[in-house]
Image: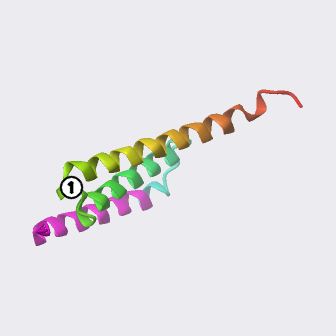
């Protein structure tokens, strides 16, 4: 099986984008946006995780079956987070 060849230019761009996103995350900590601080921090962390998975883990260069398995894992994760959050949100609805 032939390994995908990724150029130095791609790795450099990936590294610089990860550094930029880390800088944005750090600077976001000094700004008070209320609830949106956490939303933006999680969105930036998701972008960083996607870049790492796509480039460093070579998910971008894999066969379709691997991409389907990755998508299935993400859907399953979203199902679990949704069920956990719905349980957490509805805890105070019933009187004790």
Residue 62, x across and y down, in percent: 20, 57
* Mark 1, residue position: 60
Residue 82, x across and y down, in percent: 55, 37
Q: Residue at x 31, y 66 (%)?
A: 19
Residue 56, x across and y down, in percent: 26, 66
Viewer-proximal residue among 56 and 23: 56
Please tell me whether residue 77 belongs to the stretch shown in magenta: no
Q: Residue at x 32, y 54 (%)?
A: 50
Q: Is residue 26 left or right of residue 21?
A: right
Magenta: main secondary structure: helix
Q: Magenta stretch? A: 1-26
Residue 58, x across and y down, in percent: 23, 62
Viewer-proximal residue among 75 and 42: 75
Viewer-proximal residue among 49 and 38: 49
Q: Residue at x 67, y 34 (%)?
A: 89
Q: In the current view of this chain or complex, which residue is farthest to the bottom?
A: 8
Q: In the current view of this chain or complex, which residue is farthest to the front?
A: 1
């Amino acid at each position: 099986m032939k390994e995908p060849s990724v150029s130095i230019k791609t790795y450099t761009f990936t590294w610089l984008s990860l550094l930029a996103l880390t800088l944005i995350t750090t600077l976001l900590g000094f700004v008070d946006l209320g609830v949106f601080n956490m939303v933006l921090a999680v969105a930036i962390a998701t972008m960083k995780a996607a870049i790492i998975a796509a480039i460093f883990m070579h998910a971008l260069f894999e066969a379709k079956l691997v991409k389907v398995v990755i998508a299935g894992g993400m859907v399953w994760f979203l199902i679990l987070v949704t069920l956990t959050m719905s349980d957490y949100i509805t805890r105070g609805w019933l009187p004790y």
